[in-house]
Amino acid sequence: GSAITMYKKCEEKYKDDPVALAANQLAVARLLAEADLLSDTERFLRRTKHTLLRVREKIAEHDLKYMRDMLDKLGAYDTLAERIEDIKTLLQQIEENNQTLSTRSSISQIKAVEKSLEGDKLADINPSDALEKYSEAFWLDPNNEEYKMKAISTILHSPTLRSDPVYRAMAKDILRITRPDRLTPMQKAEYERFSNALKN
């Protein structure tokens, strides 16, 4: 149900700006993939393609870049590879056909929606409580990689915790004691994303 709600929110908010809609659909697709809802992600990607076909002439360079970044982030999910390639090819064609690109300022809007969606996803759980629960679990069972990953995810998905230097340092510490060789392929992809997110 929540995937449909997110989709409707996107459609409603950007009904007059299909370029921003396409970019937001990709942002949502990424969040869904991170939540392991891969069939919903695929459905979103299909709809994104339809949106893109409607707005070919109107997509500016920075929109294309943002959309490509989103697709790269989804690249870790093998089951989505064909769908992602499909959209990348379409973006390539759009870029080649668009000699006169209008400049647009949808990126800040997109970032805002991405953040609000992240907030929605965790609205029902207090991040500090969640973190406490996962930390307790993996200190009790140091070999439980699942809880380490969930603890890092909780920090990175909460705007409050993510911007707090103490929690960021904690996420880095947890990442250091996580054993990538014990992770599932899906968790490994997540591990890579977390490493990149915590580099700076």
Image (cartoon, rainbow, N blue to C red):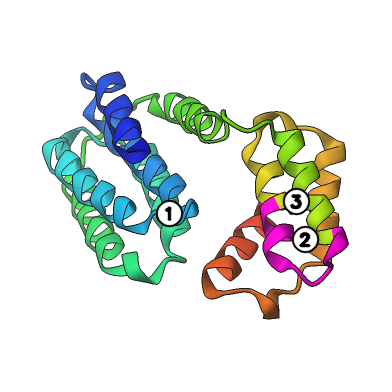
Q: Residue 120 location in percent, x, y? A: 50, 29
Please identify the residue farthest to the left as the structure is shown.
54
Q: Residues within 10 Å of mark 3 (few under 14, many from 20)?
A: many
Q: CA distance from mark 1 to mark 2?
A: 21 Å
- Residue 39 lies left or right of residue 62; in this view the side is left
Q: Is residue 141 magenta?
A: yes
Which element is circle 2 on? Answer: helix
Mark 3 or mark 2: name the one nearer the start of the chain.
3
Residue at image location 24% in from the left, 51% down from the top:
43
Name which residue type carries label 3.
Answer: Tyr
What residue is pinned by disc 2?
Answer: 175
What residue is pinned by disc 3?
Answer: 134
Q: Nearer the viewer, residue 61 or 26?
A: 26
Which element is circle 1 on? Answer: helix
Do tag 1 and tag 2 residues touch (Cβ < 8 Å)?
no
Q: Residue 106 location in percent, x, y? A: 38, 26
What residue is pinned by disc 1?
Answer: 33
Q: Is residue 110 magenta?
A: no
Which element is circle 3 on? Answer: helix
Q: Residues within 10 Å of mark 2 (few under 14, many from 20)?
A: many
Q: Is residue 72 above or below residue 31?
A: below
Mark 3 or mark 1: name the one nearer the start of the chain.
1
Name which residue type carries label 1.
Answer: Ala
Q: Residue 46 location in percent, x, y? A: 20, 51
Span shown in magenta: 139-150
Name which residue type carries label 2.
Answer: Leu
